[in-house]
Amino acid sequence: MEMKKRTVNGQEYTFLCNYRGTRNGFAHDAELYAGDCRIGVSTAHYINRTWECYRFQTAMLGAVDDAMRDIVTETTYRVKRENGWDKLTEKRREAIKNRLAENERYKNLSALRDNVAQYDDWEAARTA
């Protein structure tokens, strides 16, 4: 098991990453923590090799996406409930996008996702 840490806008995020063998290949598992709270989880399965820039990159991206998806779902539910909406029109979707643009957790996770996606070497990313 490997632990990878990253700080974005003062918020520390920790990835707990694990390699495991499977019947037909191997898998990378990643759990994303903000402080002590687990906010995302992902697994990437491979048959013989991975084309990642660095180990666990795909599983880490999946964990960030999982956390972001939770925020989108929660925000959509709240905006629909606050406004008494049953269906989403294009204009209503825009209102949800605007609310997400104001959400600090969502912005931090978006920055974290960009960071995980762009660095070839996680250790170099930690010192950048």
Image (cartoon, rainbow, N blue to C red):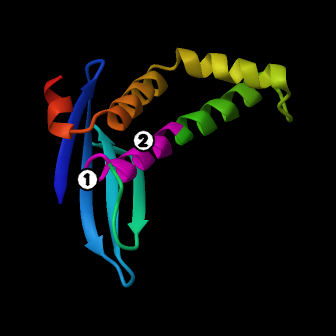
Q: Is residue 115 above or below residue 27?
A: above
**Magenta residues, as a range?**
53-68
Q: How many marks?
A: 2
Q: Secondary structure at mark 2?
A: helix
Q: Please report the residue visible at 68 percent of the width from the left and 32 percent of the height from the top.
A: 76
| Label 1 Cα neighbours within 10 Å, binned few <14 / some 14-19 / many ≥20 | some
Residue 55's label in the rendered image is 1
Q: Please report the residue visible at 33 percent of the width from the left and 30 percent of the height from the top.
A: 115
- Mark 1: amino acid: Arg
In the depicted view, which residue is nearer to us: 114 or 2? 114
Indicate which disc, 2 or 1, sits on the residue closer to the N terminus.
1
Residue 8 relative to residue 78: left or right: left
Q: Please report the residue visible at 29 percent of the width from the left and 53 percent of the height from the top.
A: 56
Question: Residue 19 in magenta?
Answer: no
Residue 38 placement (x, y as % from top left):
35, 47
Distance of label 2 from label 1 (alpha carbons): 16 Å
- Mark 2: amino acid: Val
Q: Which residue is mark 2?
A: 64
